Image: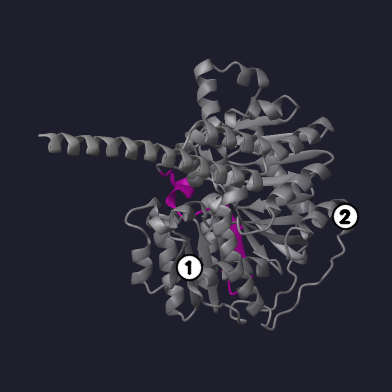
Amino acid sequence: MEGNEYACGTRMEWHVKLGEWWQFVAAGLSLLMALLAVGHVLINKRDSRAAAGWVGFIWFVPLVGPLVYGIFGVNRIRRRALSLRTQREHYRAQLAHVAREPEPEGITMPSEVGEFAAIAGVINQTQSRNLTKGNRVQPLLDGDEAYPAMLEAIGRAQRSIALSTYIFDRDEAGELFVNALAAAVRRGVQVRVLIDATGTRYSWPSVLGLLKEAGIPYARFLPAFPLWRLFSINLRNHRKLLIIDGEVGFTGGINIRAGHLVARQPSHPVKDLHFRVEGPVVGHLQEVFAEDWHFTTRELLASETWFPPLSGEGSVVARGIADGPDEEIDPLRWAILAALSTARNSVCIATPYFLPDAPIISALNLAAMRGVVIDIVLPERSNLPFVHWASRALWWQVLERGCRIWLTPGVFDHSKIMIVDGRWTLLGSANWDPRSLRLNFEFNVECYDRNLAEQLERWFRSKRDRSRRVTLEEVDSRSIPAKLRDGAARLFSPYL
């Protein structure tokens, strides 16, 4: 009995000592994790308010705080994207050996748009592509105009077709493009189709089966759902590019899905803008596609089949601007900031999602305070209510300084355009939100041309005149529950 009592007492004493030991281990581990996390915050976080918030959370929530920061606070998106750059630079080095007409190192701006040279100067410092003269840019409204023009161009292709899109649905519109691409393959045209991996999941079954059956070479950009690629879910290719024979290009905001055929009254109609492009700037579209294709498949597209000599076709001075988290700086954000600082009379903005960051809000307000008329046209009904709530939470920040917000009724409008002083236009795939300006791979074109800008201004004014103007009083009069809902949604704006 005494032996058993001694053994039990020894085991109890050991458990007590073990419990005390584990308390010290847990405390030490918690302290070490907190110190490492705080050190990472202090070294890497640029926003002092975000840094202070994370430091407080790490210290006041032991163990859990450092773990949450390790999962959500560390910018693996930028790190992952930067790892892609070495592959892109390798491709560019290979492409440099291809016999092509070199771009001019400097271009004298036409006198009618010379006052916007400051914008060009800023963009010159954010990316490597030069301005090109002799381009023609034709706006196409909705899929009703864009799809026939794109399909006709595919039908005329003789050497090559490069198609990159975010969404490619297996529906009426998708089948039209599959059939046209399949016919091109049978004619002996070199065809390459790049679809964002997330974008293939908007319809079920996906269009990939049809592409495979038709013998159309395709690839998916960064499959997002395997666990080892969890953080690539934000690195989406949002670009919309179609290049025919390296000579005719299409770009803008339109995906491939039946909803864009507005005249056919689909169940979920979507209005949008797309553009047909001819001239030397088409080479920029092709370069960006070829870089994405090389990254995805390791295939090098570098012959005259893809990059023929290009001659001037029109009066537009233009340049392609590729943006993404793999860029050292953010060329689209800088282009927007430069344009707002240069504006003298008017700025027209149409975007489906409006979640500008603090520097862009300040630039908008400063332009409005200088007397520039700032008109921002948004859809009244968004296809993403959560994003719309977050957007409403910050409208007051631009309304109180004189910017004007207009809400377009009816069909959801996915159009995106920026026009400054009836001379400078920014068009393409990017929205005014953090996802486009920080997380996605986007492609836009800056254009210096009076006729193009005035044509798009007429389209913009007709849209604005049909819209309802939002007042500061309306925003302030929202109910408390609505303000709380919108404010809570805004907390997630960096990821929307």
Q: Secondary structure at mark 2?
A: helix
Q: Is residue 366 visible?
A: yes
Q: Quadrant of residue 361?
A: top right
Residue 114: assigned label: 2
Q: Is residue 431 visible?
A: no
Percent of width and height locating residue 93: 66, 77
Q: Is residue 247 magenta?
A: yes
Q: Residue at x 46, y 43 (%)?
A: 29
Percent of width and height locating residue 153: 55, 68
Q: Secondary structure at mark 1?
A: strand
Q: Residues within 10 Å of mark 1 (few under 14, many from 20)?
A: many
Percent of width and height locating residue 354: 61, 38
Residue 193: assigned label: 1
Q: Which residues are magenta?
A: 243-266
Quadrant into which the N terminus falls = top left
Looking at the image, is 172 positioned above or below residue 22? below
Type of amino acid at the residue the image marks with label 2: Gly
